[in-house]
Image (spheres, helix red, strand yellow):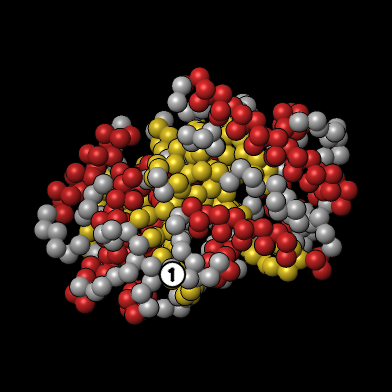
Amino acid sequence: MNAVLRSEEIDRFRLAIRQRQWERLRALLDTVQTTNAFHRKRLMNFAVATSLDDYVKRCPLMTKRLLVQDRENFPPYGSNHTYPLENYTRFCQTSGTTGPPLTWLDSRDDWGGMLNLWQEIFEAFGIEPGEDRLFFPFSFGPFLGFWTAFEAASRIGCLVIPGGGMSTNARLQLMLDHEVTVICTTPTYALHLGAMKEQSEAFRKGVWALRRIVVAGEPGGSQPEVRARIEALWPGVMVLDHHGLTETGPVSYQDPRDAGRLRVLEDAYFAEVLDPATGREVLEGATGELVLSTLHRLGSPMLRYRTGDLVKKCYGEDGGLCLEGGILGRLDDMICVRGVNIYPSAVDGVLRRFAEVVEYQVREVRQGALLDLKLVVEVPLSVRDSAAVAERIALALRDTFQLRMDVEVVPQGTLPRFEFKARRWIKELR
């Protein structure tokens, strides 16, 4: 297709998306400014916006700190409710990864809207109703996590199998016995499942029906090194990344034809990628903070919510907004070591290049005003020259970050394991 015509087609697509987004956002604003105490106070001086551009100029940014303060002022659920409390039927709680856990309530319609988004994701992932069997190998608890995925899969006609309260070996056996075709988990636990499979001759020789691994909860699903490790442990299986937040719901998903990026669900979100320093929208190809306005979750809406997620803005072939490389990290996770800015996801990407690394831990060692990083790396018992492994890892880290980090090698089984979000970075004082 002629490049000019292609550009015009994409421009028309972007214009149509923005028109739909503005129509939905305008209707949402009309409602929340009347019935939602939290947003009515925030938008007290908010003049009537006439377009998305006008909305961006007039609507203030929203932070998690505002939500925390609102919960403290109006315990236990806060005041961000468009309906009376008796209209809310679902209770969730944030994981507490980036601050105190927050309770979250959803109306029946809002919950159903999130199930619709998951149905869209499952269709894109090639999940077949009536054929696929989905396994969820962890305990849900109050965290939103895959609850909506679990219910959406059941609603479209797939067999869904919960795996809470089981050992990893018991889960592997269940996957074999019931011919599980899809598992939904974190990248960390997908790696652990695969590693445990390889340690058992019976599991190694098992006939596996698995064809998809849907990952979320951590940045690794879009990192080539992590994906390659998972796919090496599960030959023939496609790893598919997804990202969402308790505060917003499912946000983006990987296009199976393009493993390097996540596609934003733009009919459900007005998404901005802003320079954290200036607050201005970044250009295509630049990195910034993902800011979301929910267009579908009317009961507890987010309006220009700073997610803290660091992303690289790009567009798909049809002009859809995408996040190159998935979630690159979190702004509040970045640390500065002797003048070098380091994100945990970047360290993870380096370590996953090494087949010998089974698990790892990063210790932030602070002596007065000085901060250093020490890595504790777990390797299989079969590794004979652990000093050589440590040296190769230290060299790779130095080449990547222009910074020397101490690397200690410990035998397999030394470090903790994680079923959901891994907590590998710990602080030490000396």
Is residue 138 shown to the viewer in this render? no
Q: Is residue 71 left or right of residue 386?
A: right
Q: Nearer the viewer, residue 390 or 313?
A: 313
Query: Is residue 83 shown above or below 208?
Result: above
Q: Nearer the viewer, residue 107 or 278?
A: 107
In the displayed image of the protein, which residue is found farthest to the left?
Answer: 384
The residue where tag 1 is placed is 131
Q: Nearer the viewer, residue 331 or 353?
A: 353
The quadrant in which residue 336 appears is top left
Q: Residue sitting at 29 percent across and 50 percent down?
A: 228
Spot occupied by residue 161 in the image (x, y as percentages of width and height): 47, 75
Q: Quadrant of the N terminus?
A: top left
Q: Is residue 405 left or right of residue 147?
A: left
Is residue 392 shown to the viewer in this render? yes
Q: Which amino acid lies under the numbered mark 1 shown in the image of this protein?
A: Glu
Spot occupied by residue 192 in the image (x, y as percentages of width and height): 33, 64
